[in-house]
Amino acid sequence: MKKIICIFILSLVNGQTQYSAVNSFFSSTSLSLGGAGYLSSNLLSLKNNPAVENDERLITTSIINYKNGISSQSFGVNFFFRGGNVSSSLKNISYGTFDKYDENKILKGTYQSSENWFTMLFSKDVKNLPLKVGVRYEHLFSQLEDYFFQVPFISIGGKLYISNINMDIGISVHEININIHQSNSMINPDIAFSTVKKLKHLPLELYIDLIVDKKLKFNEVFFGGIFNLKQNMQLYIGSSSRKLIQNNNSKFFNTIFGASGVGINYSKDLTSINIGSYMYGTGYLISGLQINIKF
């Protein structure tokens, strides 16, 4: 039964033909935005633009509960180095422990399935320009029963600030396989065109992210926002076109609210806590917690 649930989670997380580990949630803030926020400063997400800077030295950790023993855990740190930002993170998603049988259905023991990421990022301002650039090294270690593989990637990005309309625009390319001796057709690079704007008459920071493949064919679009409720509290909300892919037309509620996230972020002194939930188009609900500590 647990193996069936694991396969179900893999298919839900996917939403595209992309390998599931690439689209898994490792951050509660990303979860709360429904996958939007490529230009948000979130060092635990595999999908944020590498050019986005973190303004503080920061330690962060997050847990995502997919239920039924399936969960992801992440830890990251950000600091300054030679006029730029350096961040590193470790991420794990565990699919649990399973019984292993031979061809005669005799129990031969157990095995574990999991996927792990190591990332290292550097971003920096371009001198005399309102432009930031960044690159992130990513290494995937995947263990599914007896099948193990590892793949190194890089993601690159740039972010331009347009002062007269108070908006950032960005472009980033994600999961470029840099192993020249091994190509992995399960993981293909995608390109993100992103914007973020603080609205003048509303306490809202609005994110829109358009994702295309390497042939510039449309894949999906994300949209989300962060509302400033009080001085130290924000409401996160977001959704995407995945609601059309994941929807099985079973319930009207799932059609409207599927592939959407919502969360609350509370900050006090040097610490902020985010609690969020995400509902897939099928109605399956997951939740997450993230803690950021400045030092």
Image (spheres, helix red, strand yellow):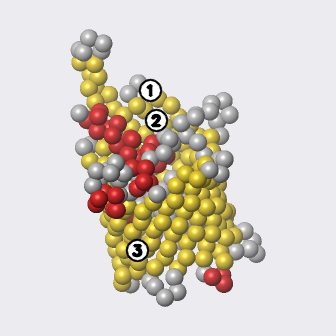
Three-letter amino acid code of the residue under disc 1? Tyr
Disc 3/disc 2 C-alpha distance (Å): 35 Å
Secondary structure, mark 3, is loop
* Closer-to-camera residue (137/11): 11
> What residue do we see at 64% from left, 36% from top?
179
Secondary structure, mark 1, is strand
Quadrant of the image occupied by residue 265: bottom left
> What residue do we see at 74% from left, 74% from top?
129
Locate the C terminus by quadrant: bottom left
Disc 2 and disc 1 in contact, CB within 8 angstroms? yes
Q: Label 3 belongs to which residue? A: 270
Identity of the residue furthest to the top in this view? 104
Secondary structure, mark 2, is strand
Judge left or right: residue 5 versus residue 74.
Answer: left
Labelled disc at residue 147 = 1
Q: Label 2 belongs to which residue? A: 142
> What residue do we see at 40% from left, 56% from top?
243
* Closer-to-camera residue (247/265): 247
Three-letter amino acid code of the residue under disc 3? Leu
Image height of 274 relative to 281, above or below: below
Q: Position of residue 22 (x, y in %)?
A: 49, 46
Name the mark nearer the viewer: 1 or 3.
1
Disc 2/disc 1 C-alpha distance (Å): 8 Å
Identity of the residue furthest to the bottom in this view? 201
Three-letter amino acid code of the residue under disc 2? Ser
| Label total for image | 3
